[in-house]
Structures are given as C-alpha cells and as structure tokens.
Image (tube, rainbow, N blue to C red):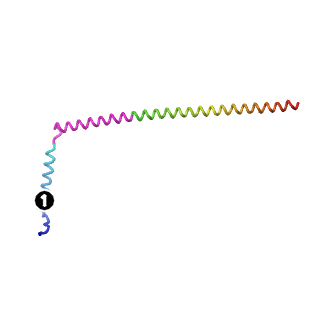
Amino acid sequence: MSGFREPGFSDRQKAAQEARKNLLNKFKSQPGHDDPAVAARRAEREALAAKRAETKATREAEKAEEKRVAEEAAAAEAARIAREAEDAVAKLAEVEAEQKAKRDARYAARKAKRK
C-alpha cells in the first residue's frame, strides 16, 4: 500500500485556480436582475412585505384600542372608588352628627332634670 502523497505547490495552485473558475461559473450561471423569474420572486417578496406591514399595522391598532379600553375601565373604576370613598365619608359624618345630637339631647335632659 502506498503512502499519502502530499500535494505540491503546483497541485495547490491548480486546485485554487479550479475553485476560482468553478465559483465564477456558478456566479455567471445565475439569472440576472432583468430575468422574469427574478422579477417575479422580487414582486412576491414585496407583496409579502406589504402584507406583513399591513398585518403589523392592524395588530398595533388593535393593541391601541385594547389599551384605550383598559384605560377607560381603569378610569371608571377609579371614579367608582372615589365615589364610594366620598359616600363613606358622608355617611360617617352623618353618623357622627346623629351621635352628637343624641349626646346633646341626653346632656340637655340631664340638665333639665336637675333644674
């Protein structure tokens, strides 16, 4: 069995030249920008990008609407809580006034009883 033969300089140079030639042929064999197939693919990509942009705009509009509805709900809830707090304060003031009136009436009754 023969051993591995190390490629020499000329072999490496020839391999590099072949690789460059293959790469150039591969590049030349590709269709140009004026080819109908390339134009069709480009149009398809542009249509897809436009559809994506439209979908994104729709999604953003929906998110903005949801955010607006959530803010309105939060504002309504805050107003309800404030109204309940005002009602509680008013009720507490009313109860305190009733208690004071009862206390004053008892005091007046005690004073009237002494005289």
Question: Residue 98: percent from the left, percent from the top?
Answer: 73, 31
Bounds of the magenta segment: 31-60
Question: Residue 30: percent from the left, percent from the top?
Answer: 16, 44
Is 88 part of what is drawn in magenta? no
Which residue lies under the disc numbered 1?
A: 13
Q: Is residue 77 left or right of residue 11?
A: right
Question: Residue 51: percent from the left, percent from the top?
Answer: 30, 35
Identified at 36% across, 33% down, the residue is 58
Question: Residue 34: percent from the left, percent from the top?
Answer: 16, 37
User: Residue 5, located in which quarter of the rendered image?
Assistant: bottom left
Establish if 113 lies above or below 16. above
Q: Is residue 30 left or right of residue 90?
A: left
Nearer the observer, 14 or 43: 43
Is 51 part of what is drawn in magenta? yes
Establish if 106 lies above or below 14. above
Establish if 60 lies above or below 6. above
User: Residue 86, located in which quarter of the rendered image?
Assistant: top right
Identified at 87% across, 32% down, the residue is 114
